[in-house]
Image (cartoon, helix red, strand yellow):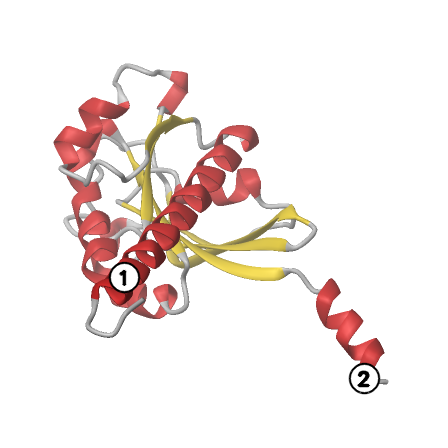
Amino acid sequence: MYEGSERASQDVPTAVKILVAGGFGVGKTTLVGSVSEIAPLETEELMTGASLGVDDLAGVEEKTTTTVALDFGRITISPDLVLYLFGTPGQYRFWFMWDDLATGALGGIVLADTRRLESSFASVDFFEQRGIPFAVAINCFHGRRDTTPDAVRAALDVDPDVPVLLCDARERQDSKEVLLTLLEHVQARAEAREAERLRAGSSAPGGN
């Protein structure tokens, strides 16, 4: 019985939680939906007159729905790795949920819209303050790629090792590439920290 249980546990893939954050209307629901292998859970609600003066629609005047809790999706990267995606609500009045959604997250995606790049600063600050590794994905609305990763990196003032890449959140392959880039960044950061720990240990009194 024990041997069977051990084999079963070895067949269970590792589950990893990824947070998808960004400003209001940048395409978080779209990204989660485009890449999820299951029907995504969405908490989209119609926007009403009550949001006037509360939600900033500058640059997204055509938006008629908004996420009021979270988006949830799943993608299998390999037989032993499954990502669970949690999309945050973008409006300031729902930011109190972010800490709960971030609990246990291995990494995060900051989805950015160059038309309203200032809406990305809160997400960048959120991940930096909590030490959660993240990547920045620039959502190229309508397929327009009229900026460069270097320009956005400079504007957001993120560290040189933070991945910044262009994507179309509607396209599954683009969204998957964003996630794979984040995983590579998380692994590289973990390896760098382990190497630093080993160096510190070897240089300490009594170290080898």
User: Mark 2 highlights which residue?
Assistant: 2
As drawn, the residue found furthest toward the bottom would be 1
- Of 80 and 54, which appears nearest the observer? 80
Q: Position of residue 185 (x, y in %)?
A: 38, 43
Q: Quadrant of the N terminus?
A: bottom right
Q: CA distance from mark 2 to mark 1?
A: 46 Å
Relative side of 172 to 193, left or right: right
| Residue beneath the point at 29% across and 62% down | 197
Q: Amino acid at mark 1?
A: Phe
Task: Characterize the local packing of mark 1: few (<14), some (14-19) or many (20 or more) Cα atoms within 10 angstroms.
Answer: some
Specify whether residue 35 is in view. yes
Relative side of 87 to 197, left or right: right
- Of 29 and 194, which appears nearest the observer? 194
Q: Is residue 4 above or below residue 188?
A: below
User: Mark 1 highlights which residue?
Assistant: 94
Q: Position of residue 113 (x, y in %)?
A: 27, 32
Q: Amino acid at mark 2?
A: Tyr
- Tell me the quarter of the picture where residue 2 sits: bottom right
| Residue beneath the point at 25% across and 53% down | 91
* First in sequence: mark 2 vs mark 1: 2
Q: Position of residue 41 (x, y in %)?
A: 54, 56
Q: Which mark is residue 120?
A: none
Tell me whether the residue at label 2 lies in contact with that at label 1, contact meaning CB atoms closer than 8 angstroms: no
Q: Is residue 57 above or below residue 132?
A: above
Count of numbered circles in the view? 2
Relative side of 126 to 26, left or right: left
Specify whether residue 67 is in view. no
Q: Quadrant of the C terminus?
A: bottom left
